[in-house]
Amino acid sequence: MDKNKRNKNIASQKGVDFATRQVGNVTKPNTIIKLDGDNVILQTKSTYRNTEIIFQLDKPFNEHTSDNRDCKTVISLEGEKLVQIQKWDGKQTTLTREIKDDKLILTLVLNDVVSVRSYERESK
């Protein structure tokens, strides 16, 4: 199954409407991760929508996602991976971010569907 099809399947299973799924499949967001004391700031910026979550590792928080879900979320550092677990309406999504070959790899898992996105580092 190609990457775009997997992304569509995950979005569909999350209950994301058709128009938002179409935009999401062509959007190429920038991801910025920074530290501010004990807080981690995770920003996603694109031409479609910008989001920012501020959290502390291993502490649950309420998250309103860019696809309009209200989740109970917890983010942990597992070795070299940043693992985000979102729970809503009896469902669970796991997002794992890791650096491989100077790229940010984002693996999304919902039920039996796995989607992988790769992000290149911007040159300064």
Image (cartoon, helix red, strand yellow):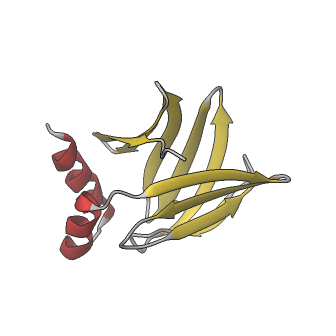
Q: Position of residue 57 (x, y in %)?
A: 73, 47
Q: Is residue 61 left or right of residue 30?
A: right
The vertical placement of 115 against 52, above or below, is above
Q: Position of residue 109 (x, y in %)?
A: 38, 43
The quadrant the N terminus occupies is top left
Using the rendered view, name the quadrant where residue 105 is placed. Answer: top left
Marks counted in the figure total: 0
Q: Is residue 98 left or right of residue 23?
A: right
Q: Position of residue 10 (x, y in %)?
A: 28, 53
The vertical placement of 21 against 42, above or below, is below
Q: Position of residue 8 (x, y in %)?
A: 21, 55
Seen at 42% across and 74% down, the residue is 68
The vertical placement of 45 against 2, above or below, is below
Seen at 24% across and 66% down, the residue is 21
Residue at the farthest front position? 124
Seen at 27% across and 72% down, the residue is 20
Seen at 31% across and 42% down, the residue is 115
